[in-house]
Amino acid sequence: MTDRTDHFAGDDPFEIARRWLCEAERTEINDPNAIALSTVDASGLPNARMVLLKGIEDDAFVFYTNYESAKAAELDSAGKAAFVMHWKSLRRQLRVRGLVDREDGAEADAYFASRSLKSRLGAWASRQSRPLRSRAALMAEVAKVTATHGANPKRPPFWGGYRIVPVEIEFWADGAYRLHDRFVWRREAPGSDWSVTRLNP
Ligand SMILES: Cc1cc2nc3c(=O)[nH]c(=O)nc-3n(C[C@H](O)[C@H](O)[C@H](O)COP(=O)(O)O)c2cc1C
Ligand code: PXP
């Protein structure tokens, strides 16, 4: 007999995550889909930065970025990542740890095509994570790619998605006097069965 009810109810953690994000979309003032993405560099030094979660699939979380960025180097070499989302308006937290693969096919093309023209050109212009001489130099690059890539730029080969396939997903909800509720879903590997454990706050 489980006491995993209310916010935590359900047999599919991706469904619960989708439900929480949907609630946050109604209550957060902006960027309810922002995640703090954590990686490690070659020396083992952790790194973190915000990115926007663009999909919760049947077995993965998807975001988009520049494949020549610092994060991409760290994701590609470790093959692993973690992220946390915190919704202040709901007083809830979602934590995910898992394995990472690139999404650089049709889905990435479709997502890129859905972005505004200026954001698409911006992706072409930005050498993300590398030094930039000045704001003016960036704007000159934007003008250059606008001239060369025109009104319908295709997805740059150096820009696309990452899919995080989790082995651990934790749902946390605020409780009175710091007696929070926590449920962690764990599995040995992608494709294995999940086990669910209630954790002390
Ligand atoms: C709310 C928010 C959302 C962001 N979303 C993205 C994103 O989806 N993709 C991205 O490449 N950078 C995004 N950024 C910028 C990143 O935080 C970061 O500055 C950039 O990706 C470079 O990171 P890196 O040098 O560690 O690779 C976002 C920043 C903020 C504050
Ligand atoms: C550099 C960068 N790339 C990608 C994104 C993803 O968001 P969108 O595709 O909606 O622009 C963001 C969001 O802040 C961003 O800053």
Image (cartoon, rainbow, N blue to C red):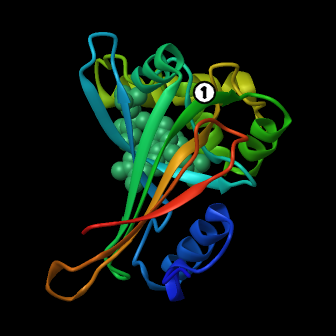
Q: Is residue 155 left or right of residue 20?
A: right
Quarter for ligand 1?
A: top left
Q: Of residues 37 and 82, which is closer to you in this image?
A: 82
The residue most toward the right is: 106
Which quadrant of the rendered structure holds the C terminus? bottom left
- Residue under numbered circle 1: 124
Q: Residue furthest front?
A: 1
Q: Is residue 134 above or below residue 56?
A: above
Who's the residue at 49% across and 77% down the image?
24
Q: Where residue 40 sits: x, y (%)?
A: 34, 24
Does residue 54 appear to the left or right of 137 in the view shown?
right
Q: Is 169 placed left or right of 16 in the picture?
A: left
Taking 108 as reference, is 1 left or right? left
Residue 11, by quadrant, is: bottom right
As rendered, which of 30 and 117 lies closer to the eye? 30
SS at badge 1: helix
User: Residue at (73%, 26%) from the top-left corner?
Assistant: 149
> x, y (%) of residue 48?
31, 37
Q: Quadrant of residue 189?
A: top right
* Quadrant for the N terminus in the image: bottom right
Percent position of residue 33, x then y: 50, 62
Is the CB of the residue bearing disc 1 within 8 angstroms of ligand 2?
A: no
Instruction: Specify few, some or many for label 1: CA neighbours under 10 Å numbering under 14, 14-19, or 20 or more.
Output: many
Residue type at mark 1: give it: Trp
Of 154 and 174, the residue lying toward us: 174
